Image (cartoon, grey):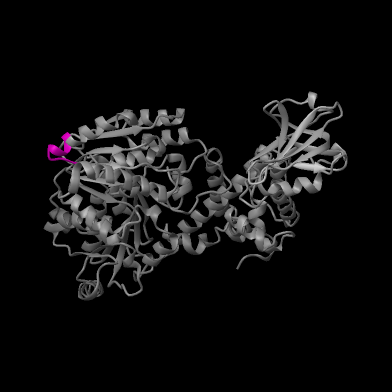
Amino acid sequence: MRPEALNPLFAEVQTLEGVGPKLLKPLERLGLARVKDVAYHLPERFVSRRAIADLDDGNEGEQVIVALTPVEHRSPRAGSRGPYRVLAQDSAGNICALTWFGKAAYTAKKLLPVGERRWIAGRLDRYGDMLQIVHPDHIEVESAANMGRLSEPVYGLSEGLTQPRIADFAAQALARLPELPEWIEPGQLERAGWPTWRDALRLAHESTDEKARDRLAYDELLANSLALLLVKAEGRRKRGQALVGDGSLRAKLQLPFALTGAQKRSIAEIEGDMTQEAPMLRLLQGDVGAGKTVVALEAMLIAVEAGKQAALLAPTEILARQHFETLRKMAAPTGAEIALLTGRAKGRERESILMGLLDGSIDILVGTHAIFQDTVSYRDLALVVIDEQHRFGVAQRLALAGKGRRAPHTLAMTATPIPRSLTLAQYGEMDVSRLDELPPGRQAIDTRVIPQERMDEVVEGLARHLAGGQQAYWVCPMVRDSEVADIAAAEARYAALKERFGDDVVLVHGQLRPEIKDANMERFASGQAKLLVATTVIEVGVDVPAATLMVIEQAERFGLAQLHQLRGRVGRGAEKSVCLLLRGGELSETGRARLALMRETQDGFRIAEEDLELRGGGELLGTRQSGEAAFNVASLDQVQRLLPAAHADARLLMERDGGLTSERGEAARLLLYLFERDWGVQLLRGG
């Protein structure tokens, strides 16, 4: 139950004065559903204005406050989409146009009667040979002293909202802030010189006070760290099953290559965790092609040797099928029974899988989220492996964790290398194993950056490549975050290449019906099709050793982590592989640095660290992959600066300061509810 003290903050946004049905939509678009959301909708920047005696005293591009008297109203010509202008005169006789576009003109007619002086606040610009102020921010009858503050917050808006409107809602939200006890460790608070929570929110809306902003970011990081530590503690309290394998099945594996040092180390760490009764919660971070699947198989065989079952969960059907084929081949000599369950399994096939899980004749199940369904029961599930774990919501992961008689061990895997500084933020409740060596035999991929104008040469090179019997990928650009436009770009490129290469080309994107997408992938994987044109859906996991050429169009639009993932789709066989990064003409400094780095290195962990430097305040992981935004208040810079202290503070509270039952612990409970990490205690168990 949410503590009563927080109720004013969780009241719906409609309870603020002036929020009617018409404004609900624009507020919703900004994610402002409750009073708390409005209080935390911090200004993006502040505008400083200068009061000037007349227009001669102002500079073009400057934010000013000036007294003007309207002399003439000019409506646009009938049928034209021109602006509405009010010509106004200052005390020195200079004329300035006050300009409005669209419906905003109604304001002008009402507020600016001819011959009556008004104080105008806005940005002074020039249009042709006349000074103008477009859409003035304020129009007042009284003197400049009444123009509000000379420094004014600028908020993020959506259509239908204005700055004064949002500022008014923010002021109302701030007036409702309750008095809450302090949850930050006193020593930390004093060292940093931070204000109280309530003062920090007020200051953040009034000025660029860095200490106030840092305090609010720290609160969020502390809430996150606490939730993760609670999960870890909860996990340790749970009774799992200690699993000790005798090595009999693993001894029969006939791997085509020797394990790397990193693989051996990771397997030993996992084996050590699984011998404990407390359920394992470990993240296996491996670069593209570092051999995570082998490590997962070794872990699953430990469970089978101990007489239990294991399940591997993949985010897509294509990936699930691929894992199934790979594991079946690798595990064939061991005799372990492996089955595949996806949404497509129907009738008898499905029945026999369900029976096999229940009677224990199936040792390892590979599948998509279909393996969560209530109808799927296991005889004794003791290990869950989650591939590309950021793609699954907490609730889904929990559903699987609840399938065992006792809490199963969990091994999460990701091929997205995460900078060390962020691992704590993303996976603070997990122990981490890193595969930072590539298996022997993986060749370096020749990466080249080519201007888009040389497209014809690239297509000619592609023709020679396909004529030589090899396969290729062609990935189409990300079009400014619009999936519809992404697909249009892919379909246009597919049409052009199909004209040249006929039935050798197949298309894959997110909107295709699953059976068509899978059939196209299948044609490519089996070698019937030679060229796969795709959006970024192929980023994770597809394994076609005969594909040795990757073309990425408008590569500068992709994040580094994503380019690295895409490049990792080639270089999987014995042949030399090439990755061509086609770049557009408009290259920013960051874009240039990104592409240069891709040419220079194939170390995913280094790429992740550098990507962080280049992106500055961008998304945490190349793209917001989970749909669960990591942080709303803390910027990337604040995460890096403040997270270690917040994590240490959370540990101090849990280990020295009496946990959540002490006085500070009671305050920390409020913090968990405030940042809605209240499910931390009950739910985050799933990782």
Residue 152 against residue 317 in the figure, above or below: above
Residue 191 appears in the rendering: no
Q: Which quadrant of the figure has residue 498?
A: top left
| Residue depicted at 28% across the width and 33% down the height | 580
Q: Is residue 58 above or below residue 354?
A: above
Q: Residue at x 72, y 46 (%)?
A: 105
Q: Does residue 172 appear left or right of residue 496 in this picture? A: right
Along the viewing direction, whichever of 548 and 425 lies nearer the viewer: 548
Closer-to-camera residue (665/558): 558
Q: Quadrant of residue 154?
A: top right
> What residue appears at the point 66 percent right and 60 percent down from the top-left corner?
22
Q: State whether residue 519 appears in this view.
A: yes
Residue 469 painted magenta? yes
Q: Position of residue 146 (x, y in %)?
A: 85, 41
Taking the image as shown, residue 349 lies to the left or right of residue 448, namely: left
Q: Quadrant of the N terminus?
A: bottom right
Q: Residue at x 39, y 50 (%)?
A: 431
Looking at the picture, how far across and down is residue 678, in whole percent?
A: 55, 61
Farthest top residue in view? 56
Q: Where are the magenta residues, as a range?
A: 464-471
Image height of 114 relative to 21, above or below = above
Residue 544 at what x, y percent from top left? 20, 46
Question: Residue 377 location in percent, x, y?
Answer: 31, 73
- Direction from residue 95 to residue 616 in the image, left or right: left
